Image (cartoon, helix red, strand yellow):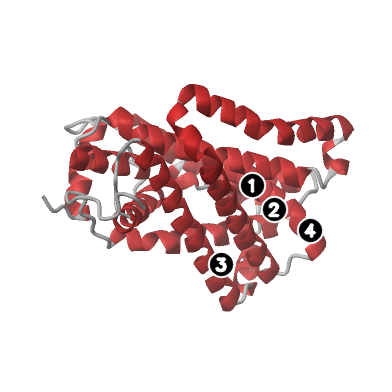
Amino acid sequence: MSRSTKQLTTSAKSINGKGKRLNWKLLIKIALTSLALYWVYRQVNLKDIGQYIFKAPAAITLASVLLYNVAKLLGAYRLNLFFKQESILISTKDNLKLYYIGMFYNLFLPGGVGGDGYKGYCIHESFDVSLKKVFKPILWDRVSGAVAILFLSMFIALFFPEITGETIWMLIVIGCVLLYPCFWIATAFIVSRYKKIFVATTAWALSIQILQGIVTVLLLVGMGVSFDDLGKYLFIYFVSTLATTLPITLGAIGIREVIFIEAAKIGLVDQNTAVAFSLLFFAVGAISSLPGAFIRVDLSRPALEPNS
């Protein structure tokens, strides 16, 4: 049965329960988002932020959008590797469509049914597989990405021993060495069937985050940030990205800005520049997610590329 995005949106609401029950999770997210944005507003100079944002050349912003989408294409491919380990065979094209619809849900409709919930429910309905079997690859895909972000955060921190201090610096070195072996052991014990794709998915996860790091550097250079300061901004970006994996605000709005402001308070970065970058990066993500509102997906037909 062919399903449009609108039809699946209506069906997916059943995940969150039927009727008109009060969605406390959504209300809490709205409250936390509002508090974070209000706090950020009180800390910054909006006029200066606007100047920084419009300082970035259009060509750099466009290049950032393109690279950001390349990262998302790789992300969709990585997620499909996990699906195939669960014998959920989705064609590359349909998986990409589903991924972009999920991006739109995460950013613009982050209520009870987020992007991951949408993808999981669509696959559950179309392939008649259990929700547990569907959400396992989605969850481990998220975990793999978070581990990559943590590794890159620690790796960049190694270049700033004057900030971390000698003791913490040594702990970071140990963390960089042990992180992926520990993650492999966790994978072997928790989801052993993913061991065979561990190297591939790890490489893709790191590549995706490095690409998004390049997007960060492009935007910062466009805003006039000096080369000497780029490393500190990049470090705070990865730390804030790790924090945005926690679903506590709408579309992670406000979390990144709060972390950048706190970093500015201890002298790591300039406050107004940091918040301006954060808003510009959010705009890049929003522009990239908009196509998901217009995409239709049909998962009912057999996968066209079972061996890809």
Q: Amino acid at mark 2?
A: Leu
CA–CA distance in space, label 3 to label 4: 19 Å
Decide: few, some or many residues near mark 2? Use Cα within 10 Å; few <14, some 14-19, many ≥20: many
Q: Do the numbered discs 2 and 3 sit on residues whose CB atoms are within 8 Å?
A: no
Q: Amino acid at mark 4?
A: Asp
Q: Position of residue 139 (x, y in %)?
A: 43, 34
- Return the mark for residue 229: 4
Q: Earlier in the sequence, mark 3 or mark 4?
A: 3
Decide: few, some or many residues near mark 1? Use Cα within 10 Å; few <14, some 14-19, many ≥20: many
Could you tell me if residue 45 is visible in this image? yes
Q: Do the numbered discs 2 and 1 sit on residues whose CB atoms are within 8 Å?
A: yes
CA–CA distance in space, label 1 to label 4: 15 Å
Secondary-structure class at tag 4: helix
Q: Nearer the viewer, residue 236 or 253?
A: 236
Up-down relation of residue 258 to residue 168 (above or below): below
Q: Residue at x 83, y 35 (%)?
A: 169
CA–CA distance in space, label 2 to label 1: 6 Å
**In this figure, which residue is indicated by the disc labeled 1?**
238
**In this figure, which residue is indicated by the disc labeled 2?**
234
Q: Amino acid at mark 3?
A: Ser
Q: Do the numbered discs 3 and 1 sit on residues whose CB atoms are within 8 Å?
A: no
Up-down relation of residue 50 to residue 168 (above or below): below
**In this figure, which residue is indicated by the disc labeled 3?**
64
